Amino acid sequence: MGSVNFQIEGEFVCDLARSWFWDEGREYSKCEELLLSCLVTDQITLEEKKKIVVEILEGRKKLVGVNSLSLVDDGTIRPLTDKIEEYRKNEIIRKIEEDIQRRPLAYLDPYSCDQDPADFEPISDDLNYDDRKEIREIYGKYLTPYEDLRLWAYSSDSYFYGRRLLPGFWSAEDRPYLDQGLYLIERPRLVFELIGGPVKDTDKLMLLLRDFLQALVDRKGVNQAAALEIIHRNKKFAAAQEEKRRQIPKPEEKELTEDDLNKRTDPDDFLSEYGLIDPSGNYYSCKFAGHHAKAFHIIAKREGQNPDIYPGDFDKALDILYSENWAIIRNPDPSGCVFFDFRGDRRPTKKQIDAAFTHIIKFNEPTLPGIEKYLED
């Protein structure tokens, strides 16, 4: 068998390492390993070799020669901080994509929708047998919140067709109009450019989006059809903002006493970080340590009884709702973090999980302990 000879050409190795790092997005450690394999010398330390690797990747230095390599100056400089910033941006965009899949309603532009987002209900919860069968054939047993929202937007009250969600179903001409307010959930990079991360305030996002789109019109950066769409959206946005200014605060939005809040038996819009969530996803706020009183009044109302004379067991009221698959948002330590408490032998409903996410956003919490395991499932 004949011998095989290998040659190492310095500039080729440098170009390869740079291509890996800057263009192909390979891990830094792999690029460093490649270049360190060419710096075979005992005259400098490993730390010094690693500094040379950085200089090569940035374009400050390069290796020249064949087999016996020399380090010389190079001219094209790209600081590694640029790549670090790119990694950071891509990581945030990935988090936005995950958030869109979990909470697509937060990214829905209400000023582009012919249907009112306030009336949205998961369409998959109310389908007949044949429609559910079609869903299983195309998407599996369940729709994700993202898929469900798109199906809701693409369907009419009288016509359901699950394949509307499949890529390529709509022609390029029809798609922009059918997207309506959904275009943002398919453009996480635009969300990043507008607000720099997952959305916490949908109204703020839409205000920034409106200004962004108007700037495109002013620069003539969009075609005529798109410009008309933007103008239409702006008019709806302005009308909605004017309506908000005219609204008078409702009495229930005023500050409630601890006793008043604990006695309320109707669902509310997250008036407190402590509360209960029924299987339908409705939230019932209470004050700290007010869960027993809240549960007692809810059960008394359910039984058609006056809570002041209701003979039910006050101490067992919360356990009754807990056994009926109600979730409890509580925390024995008022200085600690609230958590999602649910029966260990059951799984919360989709609407209870959605309510838990709304709780996270409403109170600007990094997470809600106790909910993660249900997401992993």
Image (cartoon, rainbow, N blue to C red):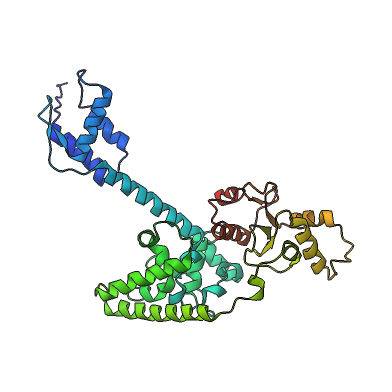
In this rendering, does residue 337 appear at all? yes
Figure check: 137 above or below 89: below
- Across and down, in percent, residue 105 comes to 50, 66
Residue drawn 42% across the image and 56% down it: 197
State left or right for residue 22 relative to residue 233: left
Residue 261 on image: x %, y %:
72, 64
The answer to whether residue 172 is seen in the rendering is: no
In the drawing, does residue 96 fall left or right of residue 160?
Answer: left
Label total for image: 0
On the image, which quarter does residue 226 sit in? Answer: bottom left
Q: Is residue 186 left or right of residue 305?
A: left
Residue at 44 percent of width and 53 percent of height: 95
Give left or right: position of 218 versus 102. Answer: left
Q: Nearer the viewer, residue 205 or 342?
A: 205
Q: Residue at x 80, y 68 (%)?
A: 301
What residue is drawn where x is 18% and y is 36%? 14
Q: Splitting the image into 4 quarters, where does residue 184 fall?
A: bottom left
Give the answer, above or below, for where 250 lies relative to 189.
below
Give the camera-side residue of 305 and 97: 305
> What residue occupies the far top of the structure in this picture?
42
User: Residue 273: horizontal and vertical position, in percent?
Assistant: 63, 57
Q: Which of the 4 quarters of the picture holds residue 72?
A: top left
Q: Quadrant of the N terminus?
A: top left
Q: Is 173 or 256 nearer to us in this picture?
A: 256
Q: Residue furthest left?
A: 65
